[in-house]
Structures are given as structure tokens and as C-alpha cells.
Amino acid sequence: MSTRDPAETDTLTPTAPLEGTATTVGRGGDWWRTAVIYQVYPRSFADHDGDGVGDLPGITSRLDALGELGVDAVWLSPFYTSPQRDAGYDVADYRDVDPLFGTLADFDALRARATELGLRVIVDVVPNHTSSDHAWFREALASAPGSPARGRYLFRDGRGPDGDLPPNNWQSIFGGPAWSRVTEADGRPGQWYLHLFDSSQPDLDWTNRRVRDEFVDVLRFWLDRGVDGFRVDVAHGMIKAEGLPDYTPPADSGSMGGGQGESAPPPYWGQEGVHEIYREWNAVLAGYPGDRVLVAEAWVEPLSRLADWVRPDEMHQAFNFAYLETGWSAPAVRQVVDASIETFSSVGAPSTWVLSNHDVVRHASRLALTAENPQGHGIGPASEGLPVPELGLARARAASTLMLALPGSAYIYQGEELGLPEAIDLPDESRQDPTWFRTGGERYGRDGCRVPLPWSATEPAFGFNATGASWLPQPADWSTYARDEQRGVAGSTLELYTRALRLRADHELGAGTLTWLDGFGPDVVAFRNQGVTVVTNMGEVPVELPVAEVLLATMVVDGPALPPNATVWLAATA
Ligand code: NOJ
């Protein structure tokens, strides 16, 4: 398939592209600088034992599909011992696998299979808080105020004459107060403990050396087991401002990052003290062979501040949430891409790109929302501005292929390669996100992006397992998204991703240089990277294309025009 002859370009294309300024990211170097990393959400990837919750043997049995897709690494969300009050982000034992997911031997088998397939493995570490089931917290509850056991967490006396008011006004990210009061051994109401998330997730006190030593040991445990790195949960939250001062975030802020556009960060996010923790961790990883990496989940704004997390002696990557949060707007995308490349490269780090994960509305729905939807609030049947599914899918395909052409490292969230939308119509009684409960149903939360994957159009639970059980119900029409319906089918989203990843590797786009192309008009994102021309039409009218071979297109490009909500990759012309 090709568009017009190169010779016609200038005459027939009044808006023929002109080369603009070039922005470069570092070439060569370590695998993670250019890697495509696939997020596996273990609860929902594949369920070997048929109990309705995914598990490690299930992942291992399906890893071939990720090899075939062409990713470089997988990141596994938590599978550690946990009461699952926050889907595993409430860890009770950092050195073991929850029976729900399998055993340490199952992890080793997964690791081994990944190695055979040439896939790296990154695991999650959750250092801001433990589960309230963790032995440390149980010990703290059984110990007196002021004891060393309480000193690992943030216990404080309450305010007011009887201490019955929380120590400050902080609110939990999931809604409701960020403090819960304990009952002391003598049966009387006692101290309060801080939990920025659910009450089952007490925050650790990272000024305590014992806490720091414990996590160095946890890192070593998994490094010794062969992991290639860690995605660090809430990497902007571990240190709190001295004195825990009151703070009220802006009303419209997303759950994880509220208020950081201001000059001073909130007292619980982005405090300077977190950086010495990562410097210590960086040295731990550097002591191991291979390129082991730390990836920050840090909802920090602006991007220039996030650069501090990826200075040469700290983390290696940070999720680019500024990019994720950019809407369907060409000027905004150009601006955030420029700012990202410039900011990350200023500290020698690659930019990352990400559009979806287990905490946000899937981008096949999000990019067509017509109402504001702060991160973490989720969408459900009663939400305003619900997306038109076809428009959402078209934009998602266009956005994903734009992303995969950018220099740097890209993250894919399981299911986006199938074009999965957010599951909007989940029955209320099936919802499990603490956000839903802590806001009395005011916020739907994140369950809609966590529904188990469809592998097969015709099998029980769409092939997620053999029993048909599923911890969140799968929408009936997900048969159309099933992997076996898309595999080898021209034009399917799975084939689009597979082809994009192959071309990305062949042309070494991850290590390339981005040069903006002008002349397509304000609603178009157009750039060249390693000789590949990428054009995304975010406007409402077709856009005339230069004459070139079409390498990849998210819609049928028949003739010289690119329809709205579409991306095309064109080969270099002679
Ligand atoms: C960020 C994780 O991605 C999210 O799922 C979790 O609820 C919070 N951190 C708390 O651990």
C-alpha cells in the first residue's frame, strides 16, 4: 500500500511538511533506555487454578503470547502475601508469594520461562506502607505508645482534649480521613496511625533506619532471585514533612498527585528526603551483575520536578504521567513530548511513555471522555460524558502507535494490545476497589480497568481459566476483543501492536531522534524518527499526506489523506 508519488508531494500538498527542530535522546547504553515493558496485572492476566483470580502459573503458561507480541520485559504488579484489601498493594510478607497466586517455586518457573523467551522481569515493591496484617504492624498494635515497634509507623496522639480528633486534616487518597485510631492494650481509645491509602495500609516511618534496612534486604531477596528491577510504588510519598502540617489539596486534583502544580509540594508528596533512599537503593542494584533498574511511580508535577527521581545516582526511569494525562489535543501532545524529552535528557535519563495502567481509565475509553475525570475516580454507568466506544478505540489505536514511535522506553498495560475499553457497567456489588467503599460509591474507582483478559472468544471466562470464574465480571461483548479472534487478523488491534513493535525494533525507534514536521496544521502531530515519518490526525478533517510507502496505519489509508483519529507511519522517501 502506498500513497502518492514523492515527486508530487510539493505541488499537490500545499501543507507539505517542513523540518522543524530536532530533539535527541541518549543512544546506546542500557536495555531499559529503549525497552517496551508490558505490565502484567497478576489477578487478571491468566488463571491456572480456576479460582477466578489470575496466578503465576497462569502467567507462565501465557508468556509466549508476550514473546510473540514483541515486548522486551514484563513488570508484574504485586503477587506477595497479602489480605488483598488493595489488590495486593497491601503487603503482609514481602518475601513470599500469596497462595492466591502460587508459590516462590512458581515465581522461579515464571522467571525461567521469561529468560527462555528473552524477556526481562521487573517486580513491584511497595515501600510506603505495609498491610495491617504485616507482623510489624501487629507488633506495633500490641506495643505501647513510644515503643520501637510503633516507631516503624507513623503513630501520633490525637488532637483535642481527649485526643479524639485526628492528628491533622489529611485525607486518604481513597477518600475519608488518612488517620485511624487504635484501641490500646488496656481497652481505651488510644493513638492514631497514618494511612495515606486504605486503613489496612499503615504508612511506614522512613526516617527509621530499621525500616530502611528491611527494604534493602527485601530488594536483595528479589535481586538474588533474578529479577531485573523494581517498579517502586508511591515513590513520591515515603517521606512526610516535619511536623505533619495540615494540608488541603485542590478540589479537582487526581488521587495520586493532588496539588503539585503549586510551588511547594503537599507535605506528604515529593519531599526532598526521599532522594537519599533511592541513592541507597541505586547502590544496592549497582552491586549486582546485569542492568537492574528502578522505576519510579511518582505522581510528581511539573515534569521538571520529576527529573529529580531519575538523576544518575537515583532511579533509572519514572513513569511519565504528564504524558498519560494529556488529552486528545495535538498542541498539548507536542508540548508534553518536547518537555519530556528535554526534561529527562537533562539528567541523562530516557523519557518513558505510558497511556494506561491498573489505576487509570483505560485509554480506549479515556481518550473519548467528554467530561472531566480526575485520576482514580473511575467511570461507571452514572458518570457524565461517557465515551463513544468506536471513537475511543480509534483514538487509542492512533495514540498507541504514536507512542510506540517515540524515542525512549514505552509501557503497555495488559489488554491495551487487544483494544480493551474500560468495563463501565460493572454491577455495584462486584466492585472491589477501596475507593468505591471509602467514598460511599461516589467514586467508581479502578475496577473497570482491572477486569480479567479475554484470551478466547468461545471458552469459559473467555479463556481466562477453564472454570468460567472471574473475580470481576467480564462484559459479554468481550468475545470480540479476545486474543484468538485477533491473532493473525489483518487490521486487528493485536496485529497493529505486533507490527508496530516489530517496526519499532527494526528501525531502532527507541534509540532515535525526534524531529518535528511542520506544515500539517495545528491538529496534527507529525514527526520523523530514524527515517520513519509518523503522522497522527487529532483534528476533525482529513489531512493530506506526503507520498510514501505506508508502513503501518491505524485505519485504511486509501489515497493521499489521513482520516481524523488515525495514525500512519510512512517510510523514508528516496
Ligand atoms: C499505587 C498503585 O499503583 C495503586 O494501585 C495502589 O492502590 C497505591 N499505589 C497504593 O499502594
Image (cartoon, helix red, strand yellow):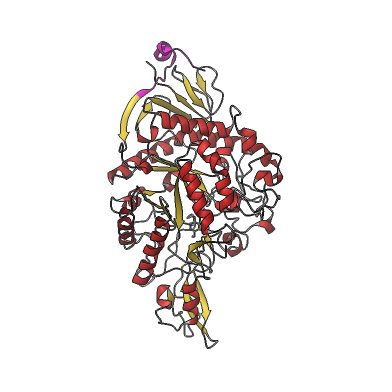
Where 76 falls versus 514 (above or below)? below
Expressed as whole percent of the image width and height from the top left, the position of residue 30 reads 33, 42
Q: Residue furthest bottom?
A: 186
Where 449 falls versus 180 (above or below)? above
Q: Is residue 137 magenta?
A: no
In front of the other: 504 or 393: 504
| Residue in the picture at 28% in, 50% down | 312
Expressed as whole percent of the image width and height from the top left, the position of residue 459 reads 70, 42
Answer left or right for 333 relative to 103: left
Which picture quadrant has residue 153?
A: bottom left
Answer left or right for 546 relative to 101: left
Q: Which residues are magenta?
A: 1-18
Q: Is residue 15 magenta?
A: yes
| Residue in the picture at 40% in, 43% down | 352
Pick the quarter of the image with the C terminus: top left
Where 140 falls versus 317 (above or below)? below
Expressed as whole percent of the image width and height from the top left, the position of residue 487 reads 60, 33
Do we see residue 144 in this rendering? yes
